[in-house]
Amino acid sequence: MLGHPVTSHMGHSLEPTTGTRPRAVITGASSGIGTAFAAALARDHFDLMLVARREERLTTLAQSLRESCGVDVEVRVADLTRAVELCDVEARLAGDARLELLVNNAGVVTVGPFAGLDVDGENGLIDLNVVALARLTRAALPGMIERGRGAIVNVSSIASFVPARYTATYCASKAYVNSFTEALYEELRGTGVRVQLLCPGFTRTEFAERAGADTTRIPRFAWMEAQTVAEASLAALRRGTLVCIPGAVNRVLTTLLRALPRRLMRRLAGAGAKRGWASTSLRNRSS
């Protein structure tokens, strides 16, 4: 199981010395939820590998965590939509005997009527949200299964539960993440390896702003901090919970939406999407 004697957070059996500490790999680590995971895991005495496209941000974060937590932090600048760079990260995961946790957090959203969106942008979204997540999971799992320990957190969204217009490909990609992760949960029973499906709602990160969303109509109580989301995920992982929906508001909302007739759910989600997006052609990556 996850964790070590120095902290009760994750419960490992490894001593916290360089070279023997467990390692966590986080994609999309340069901002938002990815950065929050990095900070929380560094405090739990994990060595880290941070993956994202923005080198300056990764370097600054890595240095801060080394100095504040005394952990080893590897920076790996990579665009996971590029086959060569994705393969390099896959090889690193597959060969890491200390890999204890993979957080598949990198993601992208495209906004606007599907018929008017750039087809290469839509393809890139699928490459990152679906293909990269699946390939990195595949790279990490054999070693974890052989060692009889480890965990993978796949970051989805409460948007995965609704087919919302203007974010059609994004919602579909996150629905894939849901189905994929739930299936893996059943496959991995008895192996000692855990998987978690993390479905955050509105979170105070750069994601909405950079995607062109008008968030002024979203009530303050609906928002969560990235740190709170990451901590909720890690707490749920310790309990062995498959689906983590942080925040009471998000849990109530998803329960209500899923209880509605499918047609009505689509209409409500579409109405919310129409009011919530200020632009119909912007794109964002959480990496």
Image: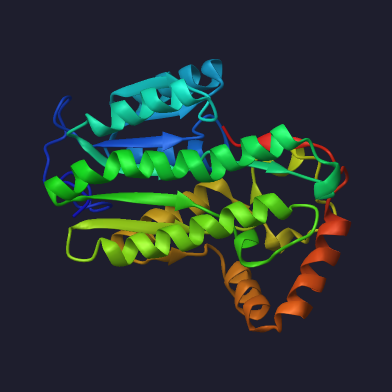
Question: Can residue 240 be seen in the rendering of this structure?
Answer: no
Residue under the image location 13 percent in, 46 percent down: 146
Q: On the rendered image, what quadrant is the C terminus found in? A: top right
With respect to residue 75, does 223 lie above or below? Answer: below
User: Left or right of 32: which side holds 219?
Assistant: right
Q: Which of the 4 image quarters holds residue 67?
A: top left
Question: Front-most of 56 and 105?
Answer: 105
Residue under the image location 47 percent in, 38 percent down: 132
Question: Can residue 144 be seen in the rendering of this structure?
Answer: yes
User: Left or right of 204: which side holds 31?
Assistant: left
Residue under the image location 31 percent in, 67 percent down: 186
With respect to residue 102, does 96 lie above or below? Answer: above
Question: Where in the figure is residue 251, as x and y percent of width and height?
Answer: 57, 72
Q: Which of the 4 image quarters holds residue 189?
A: bottom left
Question: Front-most of 50 and 114?
Answer: 114
Question: Where in the figure is residue 178, as x and y percent of width and height?
Answer: 50, 61
User: Left or right of 125: which side holds 211?
Assistant: right
